[in-house]
Amino acid sequence: MIGITRQLSKYFIFITMFSIIFITIISNVSINLFFSNYIKESRSRDDLKIVQYVEQVYSNNNGLNSQSLMNIMHYAYSEAVIVQLRNSQNKIVWSSGTPETMHNIMGGNDSNDNSLAFRSYPFNYKDSKIGTIDVGRPKSIISSIEDKQFLRTINIVFAAAFLFSVIIAILSSSRISKKFLEPIYLIKENAKLIKNEKYKELNEVRTNTYELHDLSVSVKELAEKLEYQAALRKRMTSDIAHELRTPLATIQSHIEAFMDGVWEPNSEKLTIIHDEIFRLTKLIKDLSDLSNVESDEIKLKKSEINLSALMNNIAESFEPLFISKSINFKKEIQSNVKLSGDADRLNQVFTNILSNAYKYTNENGIVRVGLKQLKDVIRVTVEDTGIGIPKEDIKHVFERFYRSDLSRNRGTGGTGIGLTITKAYIEAHDGRIRIESEEGNGTKVIIDFMR
Ligand SMILES: Nc1ncnc2c1ncn2[C@@H]1O[C@H](COP(=O)(O)OP(=O)(O)OP(=O)(O)O)[C@@H](O)[C@H]1O
Ligand SMILES: [Mg+2]
């Protein structure tokens, strides 16, 4: 493994080096190719000027005399070329100089190649060819002193640029990677803090890079979620401990009283023990249901069920409880509403919701249970005039182990599992559950099953 700084520097330097080498090669090739073409073309243009000059001199003097030849020689000198005239038999009749002359014209230095390259042009006079004009220049123009120097200068400039760029790449790559890495290091540090459950100590990550910003926000959200879960877990542990301790303490005290002969084990006392054991069994069942709905897909044993009959049965079983608390229990259950579903699970759903209504409604309150077949849905409602749910808690009540402080303070018992299981079972039936509630005024639970 290798650090990001080194990795980035490597890429940076490599890309810089590659670019410069690439540009150098491209420049050399294009200079050799296009520049020499350009020179060839401009040479042709220059040659033509010389030919026109010679023809002009010839035409002005009606031939060539020593004066006009001298003029041509001077012109050839000034243009740094050798002009050679041939007659119609192709014999050289006059030349403005020799290759050595040329060598001298060029300044006598460096050029190793003394030989000339001649180009021939027809020598016309009054529209007919009277001979040939040869224009000679050093063979390789590119290799003439200036051109060689030109390429060399360009390559030196590229080499300098190469060195300069590599130095800049080395310096800037470490700066740039540091700029990029700073937030990454902070995020890494935050991940470590999260691992150690130090959620409050997370670093503020400042960056103007979208991706890093998103990453840091995601990590922060993850931390908030984990912190929230950790708090829930702590609460849950104490709630479960409480839920276990209360019935166990009752059972223990009763049995000790029997053993000491303080109480006779009569049916009233045994019913109390039985109810406490029932509470324990329910808690264990809830916990095991929760682990089931959270671990794998819920398998429903579906059959055609008469929802009206099922709801009437559950309502009936709750009636004594409501009477004992002087709660006015109203049923508005439409008859013969049928649904394909799992009777046991639906039973558990409505029992959970009614037991909440019972638990969280004060004496002399009202609980209304309804079943209605609407156009698109079968709607079950359970409405109470109980303690209600604070606004900020409503969105959380379906989370496992979540209990609003209102219900915790009342000491009604419960672990905050009921609605989690309820929601999972309803959704397994393709249904939806929602809760409308106002603190102090009551709660309405609405369940819709698709028809
Ligand atoms: N009818 C209601 N009136 C007021 N608060 C309610 C009502 N139903 C649910 N709640 C709130 O939602 C929370 C979660 O309900 P849920 O049924 O999941 O848990 P619980 O009743 O506390 O425990 P249990 O796991 O025994 O059901 C409750 O603790 C309570 O704060
Ligand atoms: Mg409940």
Image: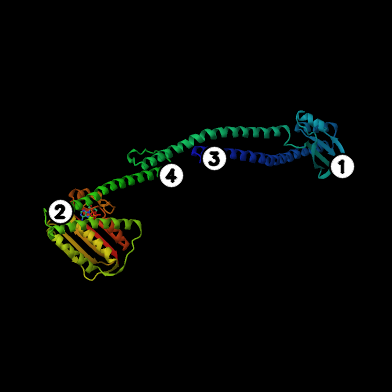
Q: Position of residue 276 (x, y in %)?
A: 19, 56
Q: Position of residue 87 (x, y in %)?
A: 86, 40
Drawn side of residue 188 relative to residue 397, left or right? right
Q: Position of residue 189 (x, y in %)?
A: 40, 39
Q: SS of the residue at dot 2?
A: helix
Q: Are the two marked residues, 1 and 4, in contact with CB atoms closer than 8 angstroms? A: no
Lower sequence index among marks 3 and 4: 3
Q: Which residue is mark 2?
A: 259
Residue type highlighted by circle 1: Asn
Looking at the rendering, which quadrant does residue 317 occupy? bottom left
Lower sequence index among marks 1 and 4: 1
Q: SS of the residue at dot 1?
A: loop
Classify 10 Å Cα crowding around label 3: few (below 14), some (14-19), many (20 and above). some
Lower sequence index among marks 1 and 3: 3
Q: Are the two marked residues, 3 and 4, in contact with CB atoms closer than 8 angstroms? A: no
Give the mark count: 4
Drawn side of residue 58 relative to residue 23, left or right? right
Determine whether the beta carbon of the residue marked 1 sits less than 8 angstroms from the nearest atom of ligand 1.
no
Q: Is residue 338 above or below residue 294?
A: below
Lower sequence index among marks 2 and 1: 1
Residue type highlighted by circle 4: Glu
Mark linked to residue 11: 3
Mark linked to residue 90: 1
Classify 10 Å Cα crowding around label 1: few (below 14), some (14-19), many (20 and above). few
Q: SS of the residue at dot 3?
A: helix
